[in-house]
């Protein structure tokens, strides 16, 4: 009996490529409870979504408002690289032994539903 291809040999079915998030790129997140945006650490981002780490569980189907700010190194000016609303599609509990000092207990995948772009003229 012949087995299918190994996981590493399967083609990636994502519609857009994911990019590992640079350390200087942060995610500002505001959930439905309101309050000030919180800075979250991102693992990766694509044109359709992003994956971030959180200390609290986010319910699948819940909506979050986000912005990904960018600081221009030469001028130190900040602008939103991308902002909008995303829908949580997965929330995985993380193994606390992997990174016990971070306090990040969940890995969250979110699909971008709506974006707003602001350009300075």
Image: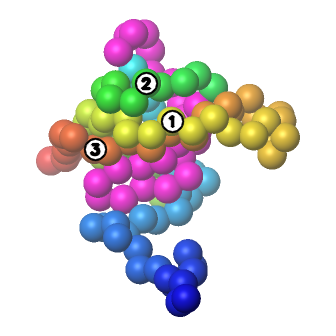
Q: Position of residue 23 (x, y in %)?
A: 61, 54
Q: Quadrant of residue 117?
A: top left
Crowd around label 1: few <14 · some 14–19 · many ≥20 (10 Å)? many
Whether 30 is drawn above or below 78: the answer is above
Q: Quadrant of residue 96?
A: top right
* Of residues 25 and 102, the one drawn nearer to the viewer in this rendering: 102
Crowd around label 3: few <14 · some 14–19 · many ≥20 (10 Å)? many
- The residues tagged by marks 1 and 2 sit, at their Cα atoms, a distance apart of 7 Å
Tell me the magenta residue range. Answer: 32-54
Residue 33 falls within the magenta-colored stretch: yes
Determine which residue is flagged by label 3.
112
Mark 3: which secondary structure?
strand
Q: Position of residue 36 (x, y in %)?
A: 44, 15
Numbered disc in front, either 2 or 3: 2
Image point 75% across, 40% down: which residue? 95
Q: Position of residue 98 (x, y in %)?
A: 80, 46
Determine which residue is flagged by label 1.
91
Image point 39% across, 30% down: which residue? 60
Determine which residue is flagged by label 2.
59
- The residues tagged by marks 1 and 3 sit, at their Cα atoms, a distance apart of 15 Å
Whether 63 is drawn above or below 8: the answer is above
Considering every residue shown, the one lying at the far front of the view is 1
Whether 27 is drawn above or below 75: the answer is above
- Tell me, yes or no, if residue 73 can be seen here: no
Mark 1: which secondary structure?
strand
Q: Are marks 1 and 2 in contact (CB under 8 Å)?
A: yes
Q: Main secondary structure of the magenta part?
A: strand
Q: Position of residue 6 (x, y in %)?
A: 57, 81
């Amino acid at each position: 009996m012949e087995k299918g291809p190994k996981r590493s040999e399967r083609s990636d079915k994502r519609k857009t490529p994911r990019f590992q998030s640079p350390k200087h790129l942060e995610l500002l997140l505001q959930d439905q409870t309101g309050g000030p945006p919180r800075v979250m650490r991102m693992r990766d981002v694509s044109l359709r979504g992003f994956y971030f780490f959180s200390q609290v569980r986010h319910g699948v189907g819940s909506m979050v408002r986000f912005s990904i700010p960018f600081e221009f190194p030469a001028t130190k000016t900040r602008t939103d690289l991308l902002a909008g609303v995303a829908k949580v599609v997965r929330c995985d509990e993380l193994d606390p032994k992997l990174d016990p000092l971070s306090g990040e207990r969940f890995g969250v995948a979110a699909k971008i539903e709506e974006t707003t772009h602001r350009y300075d003229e």
